[in-house]
Amino acid sequence: QAGEVSNYDPGTNSFYSRRNAIRTSYLFSTGVFTDYDSPWLTKSGDIRQGAFGNDGAANFAAITDGTANTLAVGEAIGGRFKTSTHYGPWGMTGTHTCCHGRVVSSSTTVLTANEVAAYKNDWNVNGPYQNNALGRTYAWQFHSLHPGGAQFVYCDGSTHFIPETVDYLTLVRLAYIHDGAAVQLP
């Protein structure tokens, strides 16, 4: 839950330290990218780029899909609600699974129907990762304890409740800043 302090002791079973990091309840929208990826500026030619990323973020001019059509921040519950209690979000630690919120797409162009079908259950809002029996979500997945969806802040500062029934392709396009497909929730 938010405010939880990590008691992870570096060097015991993982490659990063987050000792005394504070758990938050929010992830920055990073398109398809995670903390494993190269710096944000190197992704400027990729349509799958989100508003935030490693060592960088979009300015308003870079968000050509429109700030009212682009995700900035979304809810994420960590700890026992993720597939691993080590997963964040961890507030501004710069560690693995700290604060990247993502959607998944292997395509660098428009998603195919097969991709949407393959990813929607694992990566849609509140969806259990790989049909986890306990309903847990993955590290970078947007998730809340609100029935039916999660709260998001768009790049224009407005807030929106996105239902877990949202079309996955719509969610993906909302996460991209310049894919040329400005969309809005119905």
Image (spheres, rainbow, N blue to C red):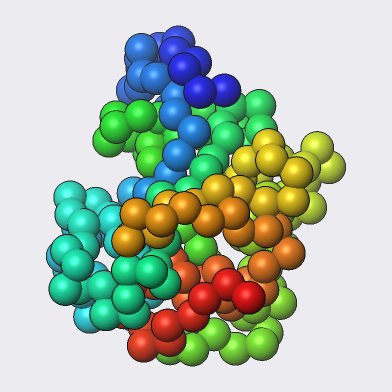
Residue 114 screen position, x and y as percent: 68, 84
Residue 171 screen position, x and y as percent: 55, 69
Q: Quadrant of residue 21?
A: top left
Residue nearer the viewer, 105 or 77: 77
Q: Quadrant of the C terminus?
A: bottom right
Regarding residue 105, the answer to whether it shows in the image is no
Total of numbered circles in the picture?
0
Q: Residue at x 68, y 37 (%)?
A: 145
Query: Residue most toward the right?
Result: 133
- Above or below for 149 versus 134: below
- Above or below for 111 versus 92: below
Q: Is residue 56 left or right of residue 149?
A: left
Residue nearer the viewer, 71 or 33: 71
Q: Quadrant of the N terminus?
A: top right
Q: Is residue 82 left or right of residue 133?
A: left
- Above or below for 23 versus 124: above
Regarding residue 20, the answer to whether it shows in the image is yes
Residue 88 screen position, x and y as percent: 47, 33
Residue nearer the viewer, 96 or 98: 98
Residue nearer the viewer, 63 or 43: 63
Q: Residue at x 33, y 23 (%)?
A: 17
Q: Residue at x 35, y 29 (%)?
A: 91
Residue 108 screen position, x and y as percent: 41, 83
Query: Residue most toward the front?
Result: 158
Q: Is residue 101 left or right of residue 128?
A: left
Q: Residue at x 17, y 64 (%)?
A: 59
Q: Quadrant of residue 83?
A: top right
Q: Quadrant of residue 30?
A: bottom left
